[in-house]
Image (cartoon, rainbow, N blue to C red):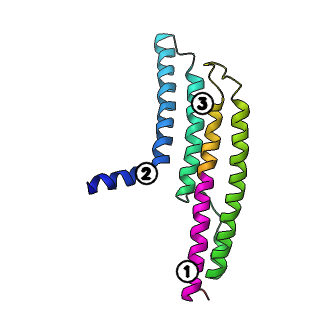
Amino acid sequence: MEKRKEVLAKLANHAEEIISSIFLTVTVFVVILNVILRYVFNTGFFWVEEVATSCFIWSVFIGVAAAYKHKMHIGIDMLIKMLPGKVQQIILIVVDLMMVTINGYIFVLSIMFTRASSIKPTAVLGVSSSWVSSAIAVGFGLVTIYACVFFVRGVLELVNQHKKGVLA
């Protein structure tokens, strides 16, 4: 039972990576399949480009959230590391607050975009474009949630250290 909980915890911790990998795998698989069909059998599926593009878009936006969750995005923190500990933490909290604001705004815009695209069908399959557009909302929604978590953690850590007199 304990091992099952551990496995589920790992899956939950890496859910974005798993989902992004699945979309990327589908992208690669359908493209390779279509290349083989075209060059070996002189035929192919008409829908592959649209499916591959849609899956790639989902992979990118879910992957962005995964990278942000694990703080794997490029950052220039050389100047910040030269500052005293309390100033470093305050700057990082301000950056997290900016990330909440910016990504939250993009999230709201992406919801509006998804709603607007719901009436437009895709070119080949004729399904609603909102299925593709919603990848933006999901990705930026997740990044906004993680930015909120980082912001709250940073504030709590600063408050706790101040109470203990560590950064006084």
> Which label's residue is closer to the chain start, 1 or 2?
2
Q: Nearer the viewer, residue 74 or 98?
A: 98
What amino acid is labelled 2 in the image? Ala
- From the image, which quarter does the C terminus lie in? bottom right
Q: Secondary structure at mark 3?
A: helix
Distance between the alpha carbons at the discs numbered 3 and 1: 47 Å
Left or right of 25, for residue 105: right
Q: Residue at x 52, y 58 (%)?
A: 70
- From the image, which quarter does the N terminus lie in? bottom left
Q: Residue at x 60, y 30 (%)?
A: 53
- Which region shows up in magenta? 143-165
Decide if residue 79 is in sight here. Answer: no
Quickly name the residue at label 1: 160
Distance between the alpha carbons at the discs numbered 1 and 2: 28 Å
Left or right of 42, for residue 148: right
Instruction: State the image coordinates of residue 157 (x, y, percent, origin top left).
Output: 56, 75
